[in-house]
Image (cartoon, grey):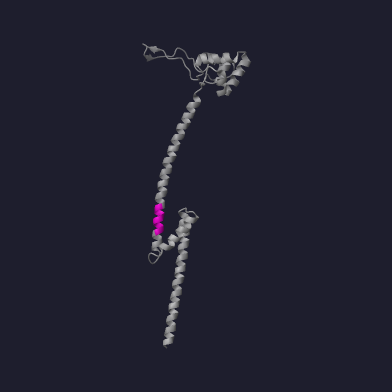
Amino acid sequence: MNNKFSDREKGFEKKFQMDEELQFKIAARSNKYLGEWASSMLNKNEEGKKNYIQEIIKSDLEEAGQEDVFRKIKKDFQAASKLEIKWKRHYRVQKKILKNNLIYFIIFFFLASCSSVPKYPANACKIFSQKYLWYKHTKKSSKTYGAPVHIILAFINKESGFNRWAKPKRTRLFKVVPYKRPSSSFGYSQAVKKTWELYKTETDNPLALRTRFKDSVMFY
């Protein structure tokens, strides 16, 4: 009789041991899968995923049940969320700075491109090396009307100093108050408005501009 009870007791112990071992394996496998999912959500690399899975398995040893595991994952998610919010805020600030700098760069580039005055206005070779299209337009004007290239450049330099926005200085009332300009001269050629309108009609070129070098040299 005693042997039967002893065998039964050993059987229960063995079964309990097997159940506990099975429960441990199930929990460990569950924690592994949970760790893989959480690490992928946290955008960890392969090495980081392996380390994080080990951290999840170790955290399950703190207390019975899986509350300790869920607490860790929740804490890590909250930390990552704060980091993401901080990164997004930083990204927005950097984007705003970049956008402003881009606007300033475009304005600067536009203003720089608007500057038509060559560095060396008295040297035709340096003028054309800086502005190649000017050479083509001046050569075309010279070929069309027979005026030497250097004469055309001399006229433009004399009239406007190669400044496309050139205008006559305003007169002053009582030598102090700015008043009207003496004429409507404007652009490279310093042609007045009526003369320029007549030029556009005669050449059948309604889009000609006094601020365009190509049109100005043909006007001369």
Q: Residue furthest bottom?
A: 1
- Asked whether the viewer can see residue 177, the reply is yes
In this view, the residue in front, 85 or 10, is: 10
User: What's the residue at 44%, 83% (across, down)?
Assistant: 7
Q: Quadrant of the N terminus?
A: bottom left
- Is 183 magenta? The answer is no
Q: Measured from the top left, where is residue 133 in percent x and y?
A: 58, 23
Instruction: Give the residue drawn at x 46%, y 65%.
Output: 28
- Residue 122 placement (x, y as % from top left): 53, 16
Q: Is residue 76 magenta?
A: yes
Considering the whole magenta stretch, tell me its main secondary structure: helix
Q: Residue 23 placed where, x, y %?
A: 45, 70
Q: Image height check: is 33 above or below 22?
A: above
Range shown magenta? 72-79
Q: How many marks?
A: 0
At x 37%, y 14%, the residue is 177
Q: Is residue 144 left or right of residue 65?
A: right
Q: Is residue 62 left or right of residue 126?
A: left
Is 28 situated above or below 161? Answer: below
Q: Quadrant of the C terminus?
A: top right
Residue 192 visible from this viewpoint: no
